[in-house]
Amino acid sequence: MSSDIATLEGVTREITGKKVKTLRDQGLIPVTVYHKGQESFNASVPYMPFVKLYNVVGQSQPVNLTVDGKEYLTMVKDVHIDPVRNEAVHVQFHSIDKNRAVEAEIPVHLEGDAPAVVAGNFLTRPNETVLVKAKASELPEIFNVSVEGLENPHDTVTVADVTIPEGVELLSDASLVLAIVEEPRVAEEPEETEVVDAADVPADNGGATDEAAEESK
C-alpha cells in the first residue's frame, strides 16, 4: 500500500430520490457512507475528483473521506454506472477500522513476454483480481506476476503463482486461473453446394410440375 492515503472531500446530502439529478447537473455525485453497527448517511462529492481517485484506488485501497470537516477512513464498495451514458451516478463507501482486517480485490498485473504468445498464440484473462484480507495499511496496491513461463497452449497463471506478502491473508482459491494461453481459431471454409436445376428434380420431390412449367413459358 502507498504511504499516502487518497483523500476526498464532500458535504452532507439532504437531497434524495430522483431529485439527486440536480446534484449531477452541478458536477456532484451522490454517495452513501455505511458504518458497521451504525446508521449510514448520505453525502455528495465532486464528480471529476472522484473519478480520478477511483481510477487510482479502485475498490482495493483506503480513502480518507472528509464530510463536513469530519474524517472517515473508508473504501469504495460499489459504483453504480449509468449504462447509457457510461457515467458513475452513485457511490457506496464503507467505513473501516484501521486496526481491523478488511477484504479487498487486488488487481493482478502480468509482467514480461510469454513465449507462447510470441509464437502466435494469445492470452486471455478469466480473472484479473485476487481476493485478500489485511489491515488497510497492509493492503497491496497490485500483484505482479510473470508470464515468461507460459510456453505452450493451455499453460496458465493461477493464484498459486502470486506472491502474498506477510500480513496479508489469501482468500481466493489457489487454483483460480488468472491467465491462460489460447490457440488461434482457424476459420472453417464453407462447404461447396451443388446448384441443381429445379427441372431436374422429380415432381414428387418438390420439382416443377408440368403445369408450373407451362405457366412459366
Image: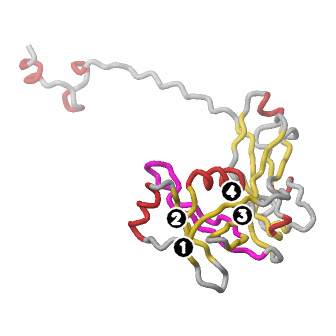
Which quadrant of the structure image shows residue 36?
bottom right
Q: Residues within 10 Å of mark 4 (few under 14, many from 20)?
A: many
Task: Provide residue 67's location: percent of width, then percent of height.
Answer: 63, 70
Q: Amino acid at mark 4?
A: Gly
Please report whichever mark, 2 or 1, sits nearer to the chain's N-terminal start. 2
Q: Amino acid at mark 2?
A: Pro
Please report whichever mark, 4 or 1, sits nearer to the chain's N-terminal start. 1
Marks 4 and 3 in Cβ contact (< 8 Å): no
Please report whichever mark, 3 or 2, sits nearer to the chain's N-terminal start. 2
Residue at point 11% right, 19% down? Answer: 213
- Distance between mark 4 and mark 2 Cα atoms: 17 Å
- Disc 2 secondary structure class: strand
- Distance between mark 1 and mark 3 Cα atoms: 17 Å
Please report whichever mark, 4 or 3, sits nearer to the chain's N-terminal start. 4
Q: Using the image, determine if residue 42 lies above or below residue 21.
A: below
Secondary structure of the magenta portion, mostly?
A: strand
Marks 2 and 1 in Cβ contact (< 8 Å): yes
Q: Amino acid at mark 3?
A: Val
Q: Which mark is residue 42?
A: 1
Which residue does the numbered mark 4 point to in the structure image?
58
Task: Provide residue 135's location: percent of width, then percent of height.
Answer: 83, 70
Q: Quadrant of the N terminus?
A: bottom right
**Residue placed most toward the observer, 36 or 173:** 36
- Judge left or right: residue 16 versus residue 110: left
Q: Amino acid at mark 1?
A: Asn
Q: Tell which tag, 4 or 2, sits nearer the viewer.
A: 2
Residue placed furthest toward the bottom: 37
